[in-house]
Image (cartoon, rainbow, N blue to C red):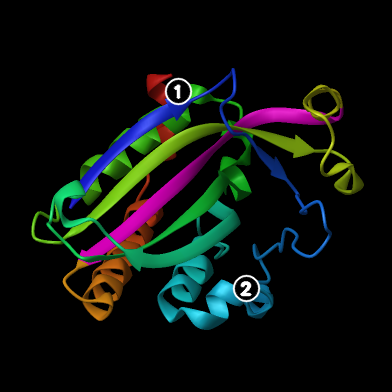
Amino acid sequence: MDADFSVEFGGEAAALELPWRDAEGRLQYVELRGNTAAVEQIAEARQFPALRRLLTEINAETSAWMTAKCDVWAERAEAGENLYGAAFVQGCYVDVVLAGEAERLRESLTVHENAARRIARQMEEDEELEASAEIVVRRCYFHRNALHCNATEGEAMEESDAGCCLTLFLSGFGRTAEEAAERWTRALEVAGKCLRETRLEEERAKG
C-alpha cells in the first residue's frame, strides 16, 4: 500500500464544519457516536458493507474517534497514472474527529499531525496490498449552535470552536471493478485497525 499524510490549513484549504448540512438541505450530519444504529441513515453505508463496518467501529464508545462525513466512488483508472497499472479504482473519503476523553485534544495540530503520520506509516506496512491512503489534517469548526451550519467563514469562526480533523482518502486498484472493490475493502479494514490503535496520549506528550 502507498500511504502518506499532509497538512492543509489556511488560505483556500477545505475546512470541515460539525455539524453540517448541504445547501439544499438534502444531506446532513448523522451522529453515530453512541448510536451506531443510525448508520442505516447513511446511503453509502447501506450500499457498502465495508464502509458500514468502518463507521460502526470508529464510532464505538471505546474509540478515540468519531466520523463526521463520508463518500464513496468507483471509476475507470488510467493505467499509466497509478502505481499499480490498474484499470479500475474504488475509493472513498472519511472525515474523523476526536471524541470521548480524547475530545480535549481537538485543538492540537501537533496531536493530529503526529497521528496522521503514524497512521500512514502503519498502513504502508501492508506492502502487498494494491491500494493507497492519504491522511490529511484539516481545520474543523465545531459549531456551538447546531443551526449555524453553512455560515460564512467569519461567522463560523465567531460562533464555533476551531480545531482539527483528519480526512482519510482510501482507494483500492484492480484489473477489474470487482478486484478494485476487494482491495478497497481491505484498505478500509487496515484503516480501521490503525485508528483503533492510535496512541493519542503519547502523541500529546510530543506536542
State the residue lying farthest toward the left: 128
| SS under mark 1 | helix
Q: Name the residue type under label 1.
A: Thr
Q: Position of residue 145 (x, y in %)?
A: 89, 42
Residue for point 82% across, 30% down: 152
Q: Residues within 10 Å of mark 1 (few under 14, many from 20)?
A: some
Q: Position of residue 197 (x, y in %)?
A: 34, 52
Residue for point 81% across, 30% down: 156
- Horizontal side of 100 relative to 80 (left or right) equals right
Compared with 167, 66 (above or below) is: below
Residue for point 69% across, 76% down: 41
- Horizontal side of 199 relative to 22 (left or right) equals left
Chain part drawn in magenta: 159-173
The residue singled out by tag 1 in the image is 110
| SS under mark 2 | helix
Q: Which mark is residue 83?
A: none
Compared with 50, 195 (above or below) is: above
Query: Does residue 64 appear anywhere in the picture?
Result: no
Q: Position of residue 155 (x, y in %)?
A: 86, 26
Compared with 196, 158 (above or below) is: above
User: Mark 2 and mark 1: span between their CA atoms?
Assistant: 29 Å
Q: Quadrant of residue 104?
A: top right
Mark 2 in CB contact with mark 1 (< 8 angstroms):
no
166 within the magenta span: yes
The residue singled out by tag 2 in the image is 36
Q: Residues within 10 Å of mark 2 (few under 14, many from 20)?
A: some
Q: Magenta-highlighted stretch: main secondary structure?
A: strand
- Horizontal side of 83 relative to 205 (left or right) equals left
Q: Name the residue type under label 2.
A: Thr
The mark that comes first in sequence, 2 or 1, is: 2
